[in-house]
């Protein structure tokens, strides 16, 4: 199942396009996209039934065009977790050792946006980080590796945009602040439920500049702490709530680790993809 937040409304993808969830469910779900997550079990069972029904083939499709506003598939997560140093090649390019524990920080919720949402670049050195984003679908406290995936509603594409000077300033680096300017957490365009993947632990991911070079390309199977391990370790401390996001770390190829260093500039458009999920487009503008 594929969901999106289109013009502020929960939409579900059927054959030939997106259908408005509120209309299709006769008011049971939507219009707010967050309602799919707050009642994930009920929503996903309704959605599967709907997609298999004759109504799915005949329901009106939403018009998608240049004026379409793609919101984040989860518009109001209570918590956004993010993990640094989670791919060996990125740890090596950062000149650090593989950590014994995940390096956890937050991206504050005001940084969250969707597909095609422009970022006004702040002063400094803004870098890209293509990341798999896990969306939690149930209340999850003290999960085990065996139960971890059962708490996941689905996966989406994300960018952990990072202003490196602020991120690394001070005696205790300001990861959360340097990665939370407005627009620094684009996600989407679609949330894809876990049943859509043959192996959700092994997906190609990467990013490139539009009409330009590939900047990052790897596979999620290269994570140091994989998705079950992250959920186990995070939920050992913090109960995870329906709709929470986990940015799972980035592979090698960030601009700050290059010689010479390279950062995003006004006019650039960052294109981020994950196999089986989709492609997230993020234009960069002047401050
Ligand atoms: Zn990151």
Image (cartoon, grey):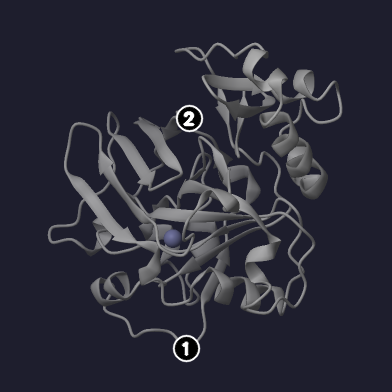
- The total number of labels drawn is 2
Q: Where in the image, quadrant-wise, is ligand 1 located?
A: bottom left
* Residue depicted at 60% across the width and 14% down the height: 61
Q: Residue at the far bottom: name it.
A: 100
Residue 125: tell me if it is visible: no
Secondary structure found at label 2: loop
* Residue depicted at 30% across the width and 32% down the height: 266
* Residue depicted at 74% across the width and 72% down the height: 238
Quarter of the figure with the N terminus: top right
Q: Count residues near mark 2 (Cα–Cα under 10 Å), then give few for <14, some for 14-19, many for 20+.
A: many
Marks 1 and 2: in contact by CB < 8 Å? Answer: no
Considering depth in this image, is 217 or 250 the residue closer to the camera?
217
Residue 87: tell me if it is visible: yes
Secondary structure found at label 1: loop
For disc 2, does the CB lie below 8 Å from ligand 1?
no
Residue denoted by label 2? 117
Residue denoted by label 1? 100
Q: Is residue 108 above or below residue 175?
A: above
Residue 134 vs residue 168: left or right? right
Q: Is residue 100 above or below residue 23?
A: below
Image location of residue 90, percent across then percent down: 30, 69
Does label 2 or label 1 sit earlier along the sequence? 1
- How far is disc 2 from disc 1 in space, using C-alphas? 36 Å
Image location of residue 130, percent across then percent down: 38, 52
Q: Count residues near mark 1 (Cα–Cα under 10 Å), then give few for <14, some for 14-19, many for 20+.
A: few
Image location of residue 46, percent across then percent down: 78, 37
Considering depth in this image, is 259 or 116 the residue closer to the camera?
116
Quarter of the figure with the C terminus: top left
């Amino acid at each position: 199942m594929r969901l999106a937040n289109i013009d502020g409304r929960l939409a579900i993808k059927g054959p030939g396009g997106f259908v408005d969830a509120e209309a299709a469910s006769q008011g049971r779900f939507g219009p707010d996209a967050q309602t799919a997550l707050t009642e994930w079990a009920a929503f996903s069972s309704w959605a599967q039934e709907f997609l298999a029904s004759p109504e799915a083939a005949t329901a009106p499709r939403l018009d998608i065009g240049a004026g379409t506003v793609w919101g984040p598939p989860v518009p109001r997560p209570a918590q956004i977790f993010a993990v640094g140093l989670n791919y060996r090649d990125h740890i090596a390019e950062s000149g650090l050792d593989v950590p014994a524990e995940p390096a956890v920080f937050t991206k504050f919720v005001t940084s969250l946006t969707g597909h095609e949402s422009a970022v006004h670049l702040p002063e400094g050195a803004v870098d890209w980080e293509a990341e798999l984003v896990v969306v939690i679908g149930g209340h999850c406290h003290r999960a085990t590796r065996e139960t971890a995936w059962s708490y996941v509603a689905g996966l989406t594409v994300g960018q952990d945009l990072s202003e490196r000077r602020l991120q690394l300033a001070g005696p205790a680096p300001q990861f959360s602040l340097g990665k939370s300017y407005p627009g620094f957490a684009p996600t989407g365009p679609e949330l894809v439920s876990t049943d859509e993947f043959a192996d959700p632990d092994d997906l190609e991911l990467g990013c490139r500049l539009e009409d330009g070079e590939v900047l990052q390309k790897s596979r999620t199977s290269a994570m140091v702490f994989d998705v079950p391990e992250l959920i186990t370790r995070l939920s050992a401390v913090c109960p995870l709530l329906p709709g929470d996001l986990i940015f799972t770390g980035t592979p090698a190829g960030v601009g700050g680790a290059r010689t010479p260093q390279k950062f995003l500039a006004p006019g650039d458009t960052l294109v981020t993809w994950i196999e089986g999920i989709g492609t997230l487009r993020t234009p960069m503008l002047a401050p």
